[in-house]
Image (cartoon, grey):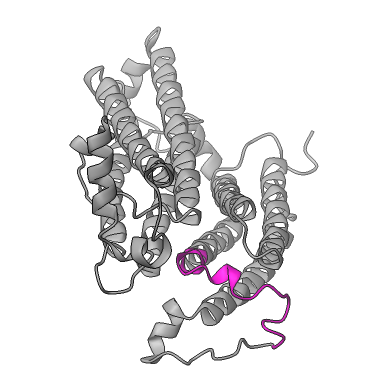
Amino acid sequence: MAKRSIFEETTAEGTPAQARAAAKPGGIARSSGARRAIRAWLWGLFVLVVAMIAVGGLTRLTDSGLSITEWRPITGAIPPMSEADWTAEFDRYRQIDQYHLMNAGMTLDEFKVIYWWEWGHRQLGRVIGAIWALGFLWFWLRRQIPAGWTGRLLLPGVLGGVQGAIGWWMVSSGITQGEGMTAVASYRLATHLGLAFVILGVLAWYAMLLGRSESALLQARRGREARLVSMSTGLMHFAFLQILLGALVAGIDAGRGYTDWPLMGGQVLPPAMWELTPVWRNLFENDGTVQFIHRVAGYLLAVYGLIVWLRGRRSAYGATRSAVAAMGLVLAGQIVLGITTVLHGAPVALGLAHQLTAVLLWVLILRARHLAQYPLGGTIRGAA
């Protein structure tokens, strides 16, 4: 058996024998082509999930989420087709508390508006699931999935299935009779939105990894900036926490309770912060407490984001510096947009813009972290 150098590189695509086989004429091209196709599929799913978040946000802001009172994963894809079907659907809605407390006297035509928002949200989830399943089967049956990637590409589908179940768990919390509920439980809404951002992060991260070959990633990892990776990881976790806090705000319309800034109700601390009993309920149900925590977390996130930006400016790689700069710019814009949203009482347009900017910021943080972990070569500061 021939001796091999201890510095011989192997990749995640297989053993040296497999690597030699892949290097045969046309092998590399086929592998690269498959990676590009899978990457495009993942980015397509990413765009659809962003649309799902936008439609979900509008569904929440228009109080449409409880218009469909049953969970029918298969038959629910077919909307009411006749006047009798519409009447039956409307009758079910008129039995729950939201109708009696918020929409008493609503006409059938008005009901159809909120119904279509919720149906569209659920239908888009089904479309995403179908596109993931068809894409995965296509690449798997054609044996185009790179070695070590089968489990990774299964993960978005598994998380999507869990998300569907959590979606109904969330909606069911608001479908009550005699309990006085007019919206879903805020902590369930936060769980639902949080998992959506996890799915987005998984799709984006995998798509970024597939942008370069395994050997190129191994080569790039040699230039890893460990300190910046650690700091950007912390920023990613902090931003995720702030997203969850934002969902708690949206869940109880806390953004409309105090419309002054930087004070709240003319005070540093909002009045009656701890009036609910037991005390822990204030963290989820007291609009002043929830909005105050979201604001303070935003200030802290801004400070930490500034620290990461200052560290990122010292990166040896131009692409990494640009990625951190873009992240910092969007973070600053998100803070300004959040304050503007509060000052205007959280109208639908500003609320949706604030949510979508959070998506953009989330992806830019992941991109900055990716480039700190796998720097792009040829961009070292001062190099020719």
Nearer-the-camera pick, 62 or 349 = 62
Residue pictured at 40% horizontal, 53% vertical: 106
Q: Quadrant of residue 269?
A: bottom right
Q: Nearer the viewer, residue 315 or 63?
A: 63
Residue located at (45% from left, 48% from top): 201
Count of numbered marks? 0
Q: Which residues are magenta?
A: 246-267
In the image, is 328 to the left or to the right of 73? right
User: Is residue 355 depicted above or below 141 in this figure?
Assistant: below
Magenta-drawn stretch contains 150: no
- Give residue 37's position: percent from left, percent from top: 42, 21
Q: Quadrant of residue 179?
A: bottom left
The answer to which of 262 and 204 lies nearer the viewer is: 262
Image x and y of residue 311, in percent: 70, 61
**In this picture, residue 21 sits left or right of residue 35:** left
Whole-percent x, y for residue 66 in the image = 34, 55
Identified at 60% across, 90% down, the residue is: 271
- Residue 161 in view, yes or no: yes
Quadrant position of residue 10: top left
